[in-house]
Amino acid sequence: MQTLTIIQPDDWHLHVRTGDMLKTVINHTARQFGRAIIMPNLQPPVTNVEQAEHYQQEIMNAVEPDSEFQALMVLYLTNNTTVEDVKKAAASNSVKAFKLYPAGATTNSAQGVTDLTALFPIFEAMQTENIPLLIHGEITDETVDIFDRERLFIEQKLVLIQQNFPALRIVLEHITTQEAVEYILQAPNTLAATITPQHLLYNRNAILVGGIKPHYYCLPILKRESHRQALITAATSGNPKFFLGTDSAPHLSHLKENSCGCAGCYSAYGAIELYAEAFDNADALDKLEGFASFHGADFYQLPRNTRTIILEKRDWQVPDAYLIAENQQLTPLKAGETLHWKLK
Ligand code: NCD
Ligand code: ZN
């Protein structure tokens, strides 16, 4: 049997929620990954170190006892974030980054930032304290087409942040377009990007052809095939500016299969296997370890993992759903389908 041994990967963009959902999904992640960057878009959002440490404790309590998994915390930037918040975060052991959600861009982003320039003193402090800025890069203007929102964010907002804070380390999260890839490639090494499994495996036909398929709906939305190809080329290039961030974003099945379905794909159950599938399809399995296990740790200036994981080329069937609580199901990406790589 074909096997692939790699240093244990980390997930640099993950949503785990709280309560019953957390108890299920965090162990799917902990089984594969050494660490994960935990997104702060709870309701209310995680905006200060005290809240982050409380949430971190809740997460670690939900992780199976023998696991060595580590939750790395992120604070949610709001119009009220202070320089003091930044200093406290940088001095903490728990918080590794701040997340910028433009108000209204995605799930639980109502408290997000409305005026970017008002946050410049905060970016200044982050630059001084050497703590990274993670960005959901989409314009939220109602007149801007949903498929153009990432491209225009880069042109109108990201360029501005970079010009003003050239030493600030920035991760443009879950990139979805050729324009994003090109922008990252020409930018200085202070800018990197995460790429999700769904954006490597699917184009926008997955949501729209043959009926509306809500389990492929996430934000930023899947784009056309040429963009998927650009993302595959970037992820498999070996360039350290691109690394793994699943954006696994669980929502109960009935909230996705809904007249106003939630945005987010649930991939944590088989994340490394889904990436292995995408890299294998591109004939680039030799590039998986850098993307999954080295580039992110290096960018975050954290040590690389030392344990290894083994993937086997073996067919297995993805469950139709995971039971979260009585009558509450979570539908995974590729529900009921066959995957070709399995974590041993
Ligand atoms: C995420 C979620 O559900 O929290 N949804 C998504 O479609 N990716 C939020 C986000 O990362 O945009
Ligand atoms: Zn996300």
Image (spheres, grey):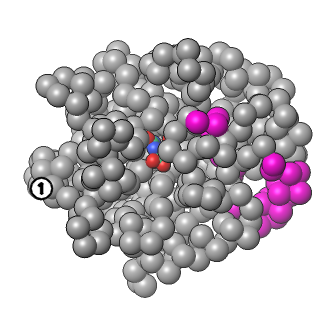
The residue at the point 28 percent across, 58 percent down is 330
Instruction: In this rendered view, identify the residue nearer to me: 86 or 244.
Output: 86
The residue at the point 20 percent across, 45 percent down is 334
Q: Residue 105 location, x and y as percent?
A: 56, 34
Does residue 82 belong to the magenta stretch? yes
Q: Residue 321 location, x and y as percent?
A: 20, 58
Instruction: Name which residue type carries label 1.
Output: Trp
Q: Is mark 1 within 8 Å of ligand 1?
A: no
Q: Mark 1 — residue? A: 316
* Crowd around label 1: few <14 · some 14–19 · many ≥20 (10 Å): few
Quarter that holds the N terminus: bottom left
Q: Which residues fall within the magenta stretch?
A: 80-104
Instruction: In this rendered view, identify the residue nearer to me: 297 or 21.
Output: 21
Does residue 172 belong to the magenta stretch? no
Compared to residue 92, the image places residue 278 above or below, namely: above
Q: Residue 344 location, x and y as percent?
A: 23, 65
Compared to residue 160, the image places residue 56 above or below, namely: below
The residue at the point 30 percent across, 24 percent down is 204
Q: Looking at this rendering, what residue extends furthest in the bottom direction? A: 65
Q: Is residue 158 left or right of residue 92?
A: left
Q: Is residue 162 left or right of residue 25?
A: right
The residue at the point 77 percent across, 31 percent down is 115
Based on the displayed image, in which of its 4 quarters is residue 203 positioned?
A: top left
- Is there any visible trace of residue 279 in the rendered image? no
- Is there any visible trace of residue 39 in the rendered image? yes
